[in-house]
Image (tube, grey):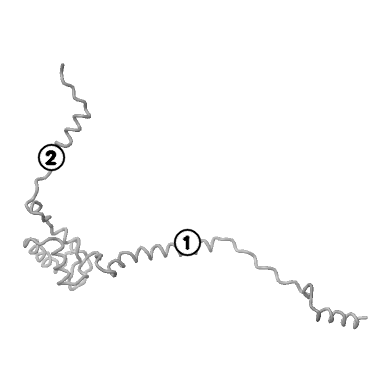
Amino acid sequence: MPLRISRRALLSLAIPAAVLILAPASTPAAAAGKPKVTRKEIERAIMCPCEEKCGKVLANCFCDYSGAFRKDIDRMIAQGMTREQILAALVKTYGPTVLAAPGTSNWLDIASWVLPFLALALGAWAITLLLRRWASPRLPPPPPPAAGPPAGGSAYESRLDDELSRFET
């Protein structure tokens, strides 16, 4: 009797085998516990600190200063520094404005993440209120008060009425 294997069983064996065969071999840096950092990864995390203040992320900048700056990053990578160490060294040298995105280390950095979204939500709320006010029907003004003496009256009004009625006759 021949052995029959179902497709489901065959796939359940083939997928893990393919993953093991096609998985990349571990790098020496990964084996040592240090993930290998690439220059592109660092370039995407920092701004170009050139004198012209081009305002570009280093990965997109091709000014005269960026070539020397990239060589400094390559030197730090060759020394075996991690991503965090390289970023800390750059912040120490050029200040926190070299980072492309604010961190989360103090309240100012956290505020720079939160305030734009808060301002956007507040603006949307204000526009919603304004549009509702413009779209709502306006109520007519209340009618003016009736001309003449008020109903009811005090003792002075009744005395005045008596005096006037005597005067008219």
| Residue at left offset 18%, top offset 73% | 51
Q: Is residue 91 left or right of residue 25?
A: right
Q: Position of residue 47 (x, y in %)?
A: 20, 66
Image quadrant where residue 103 sits: bottom left
Image quadrant where residue 153 sits: bottom right
Q: Position of residue 151 (x, y in %)?
A: 78, 72
6 over 93 or under it: above or below: above
Disc 1 marks a residue whose amino acid type is: Thr
Q: Residues within 10 Å of mark 1 (few under 14, many from 20)?
A: few
- From the viewer's side, name the closer residue of 69 and 152: 152
| Residue at left offset 18%, top offset 22% | 4
The mark lying in front, picked from 2 and 1, is 2
- From the viewer's side, name the closer residue of 156 and 164: 156
Q: Is residue 36 left or right of residue 123?
A: left
Say which residue label 1 marks.
128
Residue farthest toward the front in the current orientation of the protein: 155
Say which residue label 2 marks.
20
The N terminus: image quadrant: top left
Q: Is residue 155 left or right of residue 30?
A: right
Query: Mark 2 and 1 residues: CB-CB less than 8 Å, in contact?
Result: no
Q: Residues within 10 Å of mark 2 (few under 14, many from 20)?
A: few
Disc 2 marks a residue whose amino acid type is: Leu
| Label 2 element class | helix
Q: Position of residue 139 (x, y in %)?
A: 62, 64
| Label 1 element class | helix
Residue farthest toward the right in the current orientation of the protein: 169
Query: Label 2 to label 1, Cα distance in Å?
Result: 56 Å
| Residue at left offset 53%, top offset 63% | 133
The C terminus: image quadrant: bottom right
